[in-house]
Amino acid sequence: MPDKLFGEMIAILDFGSQYNQLIARRVRESKVYCEFFPFNITPSRLVNLNPKGIILSGGPASVAQKGAPFPHGKILELGIPVLGICYGMQLLAWLLGGEVAPAKKREYGKSELFVGEDEDLFYGLKSPLIAWMSHGDRVAKLPSGFEVIARTENCPVASMRDKKRRFYGVQFHPEVAHTPQGKKMIENFLFKICECSPQWTMSSFVDYSLERIRNKVGNQKVICGLSGGVDSSVTAVLIDRAIGDRLGCVFVNNGLLRQGEVEEVINTFTRHFHLNLHYVEAEERFLSKLAGISDPERKRKVIGEEFIGVFGEEARKVGKVEFLAQGTLYPDVIESRSAKGGPSATIKSHHNVGGLPSDLHFKLLEPLKDLFKDEVRILAKQLGLPEKILNRQPFPGPGLAVRIIGEVTRPRLQILREADTIVTAEMQKYEKFPEIWQSFALLLPIKSVGVMGDERTYEYTVALRIVTSLDGMTADWARVPDDLLERISHRIINEVKGVNRVVYDISSKPPSTIEWE
């Protein structure tokens, strides 16, 4: 629940839209704090949260179908402004006495939006606009007190409002980039309708977090899993700033790290940050537990369980430790389970969320769990972390285990490390490398026939994954130059023993994920 240090906030009710995280991103980009809540949150809890506004997200359901997610009707009696997006707009109409029916013609993609007047929701915007549609149902009859404020050629009620009650609905998705003026519409809802003020900054988050950490931890000790990535690094530095030497950081070499990573992490955090760092050599332990396991979810569970085991052993060495700190982010929570009880589909477990054992012997401390990845990078800069860490590409908690498709073995790890080192070296020479979100190699459990030195080979395939993204929630495959791909492929095939084929993944997220497992 938001603290008073957060200031004003917007409550987003989750009805399962694939664009939900983008709604939160747009609100926070406007310097207003927001958070997801279950679609069936009680009115009393909403009152306690004291939000300045409520956003009803989109979703795949139809309001008329059996089992469709519905909010508690009394949330519309709280006097709080409401913005319904797509399914959220249909809910507004349905709950308030209007009618929703299947559209005569479904509308997907870009449409021309004709706005009646440039006030409140559409303040400062000139008609016509471009809007991104994705719906099969539409509002067929307005509820009492509502009026149409925008339409498209195929959708007579593309936006509606009840100005007196400050209820607004849009049949399109203002949160996506394909609605060019969508961010302005969301800002108009925040500032013109909800009368928010832009208070959500990383500076305020630091102040809030330090106080929250001190209040939660008290005089107890904290142990933090440190990987060297931006998430765990920010977590460690933030907690260190809050409680000092009562923080002990544990860096576990689980045998699933990249080439040279062990030495780099130890040097960075002992010499630059002077943190209380405990190094644990656990390669044999992890690899023996992973032997024979191919299922990606099982890999993540095993790695999560072993991490907890290691932390427990290290904690006993330094005395009584109450808290385990982790660099869990908001997308981790959303992807691992429905957004705080909502109907969003589980995508995959993250080892630091869904991979934790049920009998956890620590209290969790997750100071970044309300942040998106790009917000963490801003926070890293605020805390003074060096550029090398600040701009480090995301690396999965389970490490190379989820970049080896199938069973994890030492020979396969060696092949992948060598291939990934080549990818990193060549990508860092690329002039547009700062625009790349992630670039890495994967080892596929596929062997194919090749020819090397006039001899037949039957060896592994390496896949290249290079993507662009703003926050990791959506991503597109990078259109890198052919000669760059050629150099990477040539080097891997010639320098990495056991590989005779390299392929390039040209899938976007969604429908694919960035990592393959």
Image (cartoon, grey):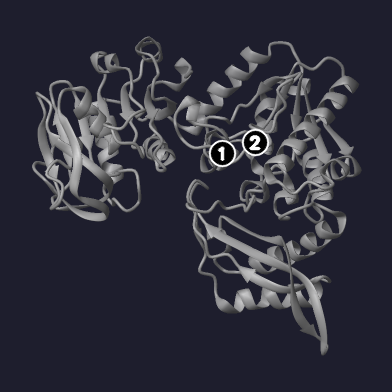
Residue lying at 11% horizontally and 28% vertically, measured from the top left: 146
Pick the front one: 90 or 465: 90
Dots 2 and 1: beta carbons under 8 Å? yes
Point out residue 373 in the picture as x, y percentages from the top left corner.
Answer: 55, 42
Residue at disc 1, secondary structure: helix
Residue lying at 75% horizontally and 16% vertically, measured from the top left: 322
**Residue at which label 1 appears:** 376
* Label drawn at residue 61: none
Is residue 123 visible to us here? no
Point out residue 141 in the picture as x, y percentages from the top left corner.
Answer: 11, 33
- Position of 91 with respect to 424 (left or right) is left
Picture quarter containing residue 450?
A: bottom right
Q: Residues within 10 Å of mark 1 (few under 14, many from 20)?
A: many
Q: Amino acid at mark 2?
A: Val
Q: Residues within 10 Å of mark 2 (few under 14, many from 20)?
A: many
Residue at disc 2, secondary structure: helix
Point out residue 266 in the picture as x, y percentages from the top left corner.
Answer: 82, 43
Pick the front one: 470 or 105: 105
Q: CA distance from mark 2 to mark 1?
A: 8 Å
Against 372, residue 96 (above or below) is above
Against 516, residue 378 (above or below) is above
**Residue at which label 2 appears:** 234
Residue lying at 38% horizontally and 22% vertically, measured from the top left: 8
